[in-house]
Amino acid sequence: MQKGNIGVTTENIFPIIKKFLYSDHEIFLRELVSNAVDATQKLKTLASKGEFKGEMGDLTVKVSLNADTITISDRGIGLTAEEIEKYINQIAFSGANDFLEKYKDDANAIIGHFGLGFYSAFMVAKKVEIITKSYREDAQAVKWTCDGSPEFTIEDVEKADRGSDIILYIDDDCKEFLEEARISALLTKYCRFLPIPVAFGKKKEWKDGKQVETNEDNIINETYPLWTRKPMELKDEDYKKFYQELYPMADEPLFWIHLNVDYPFNLTGILYFPKIKSNIELQRNKIQLYCNQVYVTDSVEGIVPDFLTLLHGVIDSPDIPLNVSRSYLQSDSNVKKISTYISKKVSDRLQAIFKNNRKEFEEKWDDLKIFINYGMLTQEDFYEKANKFALLKDTDGKYYTYEEYQSLIKDNQTDKDGNLIYLYSNNMDEQYSYIDAAKNRGYNILLMDGQLDVAMISMLEQKFEKSRFTRVDSDVIDRLIAKEEHKEANLESNQREILSSVFRSQLPQIKKVEFNVETQALGENGAPIMITQSEYMRRMKEMANIQAGMSFYGEMPNMYNLVLNADHKLVKQVLTDADNSCKAALEPIESEMANLNNRRKELQKAQEGKKTEDIPQAEKDELNDIEKKISDETTKKQAVLGEYANGNKIIHQLIDLALLQNNMLKGEALTNFVKRSIELI
């Protein structure tokens, strides 16, 4: 028996491995099974070169559990005592590295680094044994034993067959790895597509009311997964079946892209476009990254452009640089090349579908929209390609390219300043009356109800020349697309004030909502009253919900315009009735206000051109007193008008109709509206 010390300079090598090389204990199984597959692949390479002429036999890698051990067995090339000394005892060396150098033109299937990968075993094991026999003729089988300290023993043993058995004596704090279900789940996660069969125990069947083991190996992996095959060999059903295997509970994908490139880097894979209609974040991390069919991670940021992390599927590349534990990407020029390639393949595929089968593309647009919009928002070069096939959908369900839509609306939806106005709705039911009014003017209205449409609108306004997006309920119909200077209502200032006061006095108090009352001439057939919201402020508040740094707008109250149609007979009736009903009460107030205003003008004129210190204090005091009295008289006037308005059912009914139209009439106010409506009928 030989005793020795592993070729390292510190006794803390195993804590270092645990702490720095491997972030998760479960990785040990991937590393050891990958090494076993690696050793088997090496034997197949040697056989193809004529350097191994023996019988290949069953090459299945086997994983088995015992009361306190896990064993990973292979019939690969095995190790001699000298190779154990080089590749196991001297941690800095890697058998795979030497093998790759020797067979660099034919060794693409070699997975990993036997040296450091092997030592991941000590994350879960208090003792590890290697019983191994080299494929070489007359090789002596040896047993290597180490308890996690720098010391080891190596001795000759009897072993009938070539290959290696790695036996892990599981530590007390890692007993979970002795559970059959836990190991089965890890093998499925990390090893389900390894290129050599991997067996975990035997298949089971029901017999006499219980499950019993059969003599057949329970193979857990598919050695020839779909992405390794040629697209010409596959049918749509094959791609759909593979998708269901990857994502058993998912809806059928929209379509897929088969990746296959060998220059200037090696990359294979299949990317699927899933159906996504809500919460982007919940759908991320669905692309699985493999390295020569060994699962690495599902965090593919950096390899796949950010907007394509919404896709599902598999990417496999030996050229993606990983650290020794294969858990993290390392910066490398190949990563950027791969990202660019994937983005181009996706845009080319979308372009081809649009060009060859526009009907199918339009049918899938509502699901594709989130991918394409996200890409155009985040990646300029993708926008340059996608703006040729990205679509706009109107409220009638028709689809247009950007260029087509510009041609459609340019004659009728250009304002007096030459701006092309894109009218849109984000809720067809809530904004129905506004949409209807716009359609009656011959306008076309887009449906922009997607998660990213607020951001898209802002971006497209920057991309399109002299263009502006306006929500259909952001103003009265005459001002949505201003064709000429706006016509003011033919009312005296006092009449405007009366209308404004009586309606403002009856507006409800709604949390974080403020109203501005204005009067416009909208024609006898126009609505008597409407509520609109400024496009700018509403959009800023919507952007605040999705963009960091704009929370200021989110905290601001919602600002609405209550627009009174001075041409409508009901508004005229309210004005006449208010004027008649309040005339007697308002005359002395208005007379007093007229006197106060005249005196204020006299004082202000006398003070023109004077410095503050040159104005007599008495005049200052008198002016302040007048301002207070005017304010008091204004309050009295508003109280008179408010008292009148409080008893006017038409005012209440008109306000409630406007609120109801905008989904702002709720609770007790809605009940009162219904009762009042019945009374009026």
Image (spheres, rainbow, N blue to C red):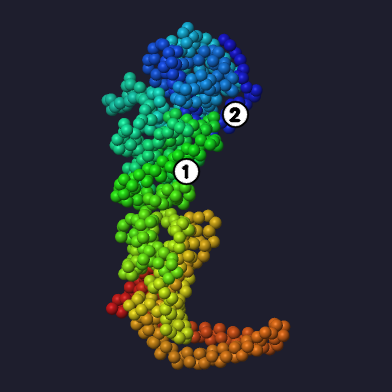
Mark 2: which amino acid? Pro
Q: Position of residue 572 (x, y in %)?
A: 37, 84
Q: Position of residue 440 (x, y in %)?
A: 31, 69
Q: Position of residue 396 (x, y in %)?
A: 30, 60
Q: Secondary structure at mark 1?
A: loop
Going 43% across and 10% down the picture, which residue do you hit?
Answer: 160
Q: Is residue 421 visible?
A: yes
Seen from the viewer's position, the closer of residues 198 and 485 is: 485
Q: Position of residue 357 (x, y in %)?
A: 30, 47
Q: Is residue 509 above or below residue 156?
A: below
Going 54% across and 89% down the picture, which residue do you hit?
Answer: 593
Q: Is residue 534 above or below residue 132?
A: below
| Image disc number at residue 230 | none
Residue 565 sits in which quadrant? bottom left
C-beta proximity under 8 Å, tags 2 and 1: no
Mark 1: which amino acid? Pro
Question: Dot 2: within a 10 Å radius of its alpha carbon, few (fewer than 14), some, or many (20 or more) residues?
Answer: few
Furthest-top residue in this view: 138
Look at the image and tell me in which quarter the C terminus lies.
bottom left
* Tag 2 residue: 15
Residue 53 sits in which quadrant? top left
Q: Is residue 532 visible?
A: no
Seen from the viewer's position, the closer of residues 24 and 344 is: 344
Q: Is residue 77 above or below residue 256?
A: above
Seen from the viewer's position, the closer of residues 226 and 181 is: 226
Q: Secondary structure at mark 2?
A: helix
Give left or right: position of 28 versus 230: right
Dot placed on the residue nearer the N-terminal end, 2 or 1? 2
Going 32% across and 51% down the picture, which residue do you hit?
Answer: 362
* Tag 1 residue: 305
Q: CA distance from mark 2 to mark 1?
A: 36 Å
Look at the image and tell me in which quarter the N terminus lies.
top right
